[in-house]
Image (cartoon, rainbow, N blue to C red):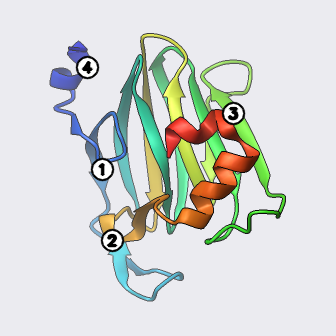
């Protein structure tokens, strides 16, 4: 077991890997996405180990990824609405944070994202504003979205 798990009191994340909340603002704001109250900002440590992945998911607010330690992290990003149309082209990218691509990447609200380490482990931070709430989080469970990945990016199927 990676010693960072106990050092930062990380627990398993539903998408894969481990996380621990570092900060949650006491200030509250109204989400422009659904008009519900959320913390103004939240931040977590997120750890992915070799052979583990962060499954395709989306958050209803902007998420900023920051690299901290270990091997660079491969962050996969699909700019697409839900559900995706099978024959539609969408902007996609694989960004390596913690290397030549830089140490930060932003996933805009509602975009699909997935990740994996390029080595033994990657420790990153994720900030969400308005703050993260599991009610604003969803996996790629829609069959149309999955079909788009299967047909257009079959090497990403393992992230579903």
Residue 111 visible from this viewpoint: no
Q: Which residue is mark 4?
A: 4
Q: Residues within 10 Å of mark 1 (few under 14, many from 20)?
A: few
Real-space Cα distance between discs 1 and 4? 18 Å
Identified at 51% across, 66% down, the residue is: 142
The residue pinned by badge 3 equals 95
Tell whether 30 sits left or right of 74.
left
Residue found 16% across the figure and 32% down from its top: 9
Spatial separation of the CA atoms under disc 1 and disc 3: 25 Å
Q: Looking at the image, is mark 1 or mark 3 nearer the viewer?
A: 3
Q: Which residue is most to the top? A: 120
Q: Are marks 4 and 2 in contact (CB under 8 Å)?
A: no
| Residue at far bottom of view | 35
Determine the CA span between mark 4 and mark 2.
27 Å
Q: In terms of depth relative to the viewer, which is nearer, 33 or 13?
A: 13
Indicate which label's residue lies in the foreground, 3 or 4. Answer: 3
Secondary-structure class at tag 2: helix
Say which label, 2 or 3, has the lower sequence index.
Answer: 3
Earlier sequence position, callout 1 versus callout 4: 4
Percent position (x, y) of residue 21?
27, 46
Q: Earlier in the sequence, mark 1 or mark 2?
A: 1
- Report which quarter residue 62 is drawn in: bottom right
Q: Is residue 14 above or below residue 109?
A: above
Q: Position of residue 158 (x, y in %)?
A: 52, 36
Task: Please give the residue where the numbered disc 2 appears in the rendered image.
Answer: 135
Which label is found at residue 146? Answer: none
Mark 1 touching mark 4, by CB under 8 A?
Answer: no
Query: Which quadrant of the figure has residue 130?
Result: bottom left
Instruction: Report how far apart the C-alphas of labels 2 and 3 lie in the structure.
Output: 27 Å
SS for callout 4: helix
- For label 1, the residue is 23
Residue 3 locus on image (x, y percent):
21, 14
């Amino acid at each position: 077991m990676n010693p960072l798990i106990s050092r930062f009191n990380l627990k398993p994340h539903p998408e894969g890997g481990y996380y621990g909340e570092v900060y949650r603002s006491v200030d509250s704001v109204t989400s422009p996405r659904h008009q519900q109250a959320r913390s103004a900002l939240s931040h977590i440590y997120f750890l992915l180990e070799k052979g583990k992945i962060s499954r395709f998911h989306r958050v209803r607010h902007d998420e900023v990824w920051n690299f901290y330690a270990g091997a660079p992290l491969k962050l996969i990003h699909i700019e697409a609405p839900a559900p995706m149309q099978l024959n539609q082209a969408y902007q996609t990218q694989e960004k390596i944070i913690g290397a030549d691509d830089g140490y930060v990447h932003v996933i805009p609200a509602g975009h699909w994202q997935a990740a994996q380490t390029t080595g033994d482990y990657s420790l990153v931070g994720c900030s969400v504003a308005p703050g993260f709430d599991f009610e604003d989080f969803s996996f790629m469970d829609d069959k149309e979205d999955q079909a788009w990945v299967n047909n257009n990016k079959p090497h990403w199927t393992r992230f579903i």
